[in-house]
Amino acid sequence: MRENLEGKVSKASSLLDVLNVMKEKTMLDTHVATLAYVQEIVLEAGTEGSIYGCLRVKPFPLNYNQQEYAIQAYYFDKKHKYAVNDIVLIVFCDLNFISSLNAIDYKPKMTNDPLTHSLKYGIVIPLMASHVD
C-alpha cells in the first residue's frame, strides 16, 4: 500500500526527510506532458474564425488510486482531423497562454496568472496518423 504525503510528513524525522517529501510533491504538481485519449472535439480549428482548436481529452496512465479525469487542450494544426479515442500527446506550457491566443497584434503578452505548469495550459501533439486528411 502506498503512503500518502501527509503520512510521509508526519513520519519525517529529519530535515532531509521533509525535503524529500517536498521534492515528491513538487514533482507531482509539475506537469510536463502526458498521453491522452480524445474524448470530445470542443472547437475545431478554423471554425468561427479561430486560429486554434480545443479538445477535451482524458490523460493516461493514471497514478495509483487516481480517478479518471478530463482536461481541455489546444491545437493549432488545421489540417489534422481529430476523432474520439485518438491518442495524442499533451505538452503543458509553463505559463497561461490562453488569453494571448486571440490577440490581434501577434505580440507576446504578459500573463497575470501566477500558476505554472497547470493542467489548463495543454497543447495537443497528434500521434495517430489514421485520421489525417
Image: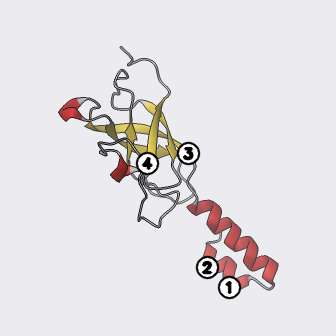
Left of 28 or right of it: where is 72?
left
Q: Amino acid at mark 3?
A: Ala
Q: Which residue is mark 3?
A: 33
User: Quick one: quadrant of the N terminus?
Assistant: bottom right
Q: Amino acid at mark 4?
A: Pro
Left of 125 or right of it: where is 12?
right
* Label ID, residue 6: 2
Q: Amino acid at mark 2?
A: Glu
Which residue is nearer to you in this view: 1 or 93?
93
Residue drawn at 26 percent across, 35 percent down = 50
* Label ID, residue 10: 1
Image quadrant in which you'd find residue 104: top left
Q: CA distance from mark 4 to mark 3?
A: 23 Å
* Upstream in sequence: badge 1 or badge 4: 1
- Residue 21 drawn above or below residue 111: below
The reply to whether dot 2 and dot 1 touch (C-beta < 8 Å) is: yes
Residue drawn at 33 percent across, 42 percent down = 105
Q: Secondary structure at mark 2?
A: helix
Q: CA distance from mark 2 to mark 3?
A: 26 Å
Question: Around disc 2, counting alpha carbons within 10 Å, would you say few (fewer than 14), some (14 to 19), or many (20 or more)?
Answer: few
Question: Around disc 3, counting alpha carbons within 10 Å, would you say few (fewer than 14), some (14 to 19), or many (20 or more)?
Answer: some
Left of 69 or right of it: where is 53?
left
